[in-house]
Amino acid sequence: MKTSSMLRSLTNFLVKLLASSAVAPLPATTSFGHQLTSQLNTIQSQTDSQNANGLLHALVDAATTTQQITLNSLSDFTTTTCQPSDRKIIDDYLDFNVKMLDTCNQLTEKIDTIRNYEESLKVVSRLLESGQPHPTTLARAKHLLDSCHNATETKRPFKRFFSQKLAQSSSSDSKLAEILGGSKAVTSLVCEILGTALSFKSKRGLRPLLQQTRSVSSSTYWSCSLQQLQKQIREHQKSGSSMMLTELHQTVKAAHYLRNQIKGRNTTSDDLEELKRRCEELEKEIKPFEEKVKEMYKHLISVRMALLGILSSQF
Ligand SMILES: *[C@@H]1O[C@H](CO)[C@@H](O)[C@H](O)[C@H]1NC(C)=O
Ligand SMILES: *[C@@H]1O[C@H](CO)[C@@H](O)[C@H](O)[C@H]1NC(C)=O
């Protein structure tokens, strides 16, 4: 499946990205780098046995685990390990952290929208259950289907933060820069993938992430790898593969079909069954994401608190 291959190449990329930090001349290999690489390797080793959603779950879990690894690594920072330049790195990260908290809220809103959508469709299938619905019941079902259709057409801008700036912020050779840079890259990439999966309109896939820049020659491992990712993503965009959550895609299709059948006064019980089944699958699939986003949020807050602690004790 195309979605699955998209995620696979992203995972491959992440593993390469972090593996490259082990051989890069820049920072000494940190325990942070090792841990991050190993968790991404685990995801990659499961890639073939998992469907696209399984990988999506694994990536979201990885983002949360990354916060945990970040937090553990930060606890090593004592008064002797922070350099004066680290202050800016921390400030930059804190700025990023606020944006990611905001992104988590946006993801929660997306999940709520999908749940409302799915609830409305369940009402539709109940209204039409009798086979010969009363005209007012039929009208109500039609109206609900129309508003569901409208919901899928509504654009909800989703801010994205995976950018050139992230690559630049890790060009410093301090240990802290490596930790926070890695943390940023994984978190923002995963949020972007999840945001796309939970969007009604994600035919276009991920947008190009980076612009070619002069800084390439000074190539930190981050910027090199980011360029590589951009290339992969462009390739996928050309192939037109969708990153939308499979169950969401299937539900939208079933609702669309039913809407047309009603218009043609040709609704069958099979169409209703299909919609009901898709809704149930979607409900089951979407639920765990709600918890996972909450988890990620909590962990981002913990990292934030730890950094504020370092700032107040060292600067
Ligand atoms: C759906 O959108 C169309 C076009 O914007 C509008 O005319 C219609 O009233 C909307 N229907 C519902 C049920 O929201
Ligand atoms: C009604 O739907 C059935 C099954 O979907 C299809 O085979 C048939 O051609 C449709 N009839 C009309 C009048 O659209």
Image: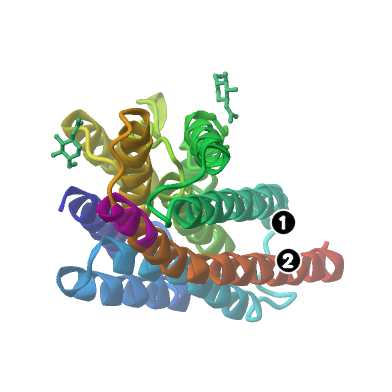
Residue 11 in the image: state x and y as whole percent. Answer: 28, 60
Give the mark nearest the N terminus, 2 or 1.
1
What is the total number of numbered labels drawn onto the structure image?
2
Q: Nearer the viewer, residue 120 or 30?
A: 120
Q: Nearer the viewer, residue 2 or 231?
A: 2
Rendered residue at 52%/61% (across/down)? 183
77 shown above or below 160: below
Q: Dot 1: within a 10 Å radius of its alpha carbon, few (fewer than 14), some, or many (20 or more) residues?
A: few
> Can residue 163 be seen from the camera position used here?
yes
Q: Determine the secondary structure under disc 2.
A: helix
**What stretch of residues is rendered in magenta?**
269-276
Q: Nearer the viewer, residue 225 or 257?
A: 257
Question: Which amino acid type is shown beneath numbered disc 1?
Answer: Pro
35 shown above or below 147: below
> Can residue 217 be seen from the camera position used here?
no
* Quadrant of the rendered image containing residue 136: top right
Residue 123 in the image: state x and y as whole percent. Answer: 53, 54
Calculate the distance from the C-alpha at mark 2 to the C-alpha at mark 1.
14 Å
Main secondary structure type of the part rendered in magenta: helix
The residue to which callout 2 is attached is 307
Magenta stretch contains residue 24: no
User: Quick check: is the Cβ at mark 2 less than 8 Å away from ligand 1?
Assistant: no
Q: Nearer the viewer, residue 162 or 127?
A: 127
Numbered mark located on residue 189 in the image: none
Question: Which amino acid type is shown beneath numbered disc 2?
Answer: Leu
User: Where the C terminus falls, by quadrant?
Assistant: bottom right
Rendered residue at 22%/58% (across/down)? 8
Q: Are marks 2 and 1 in contact (CB under 8 Å)?
A: no
Residue 222 in the image: state x and y as whole percent. Answer: 38, 49
The residue to which callout 1 is attached is 84
Rendered residue at 44%/54% (across/down)? 125
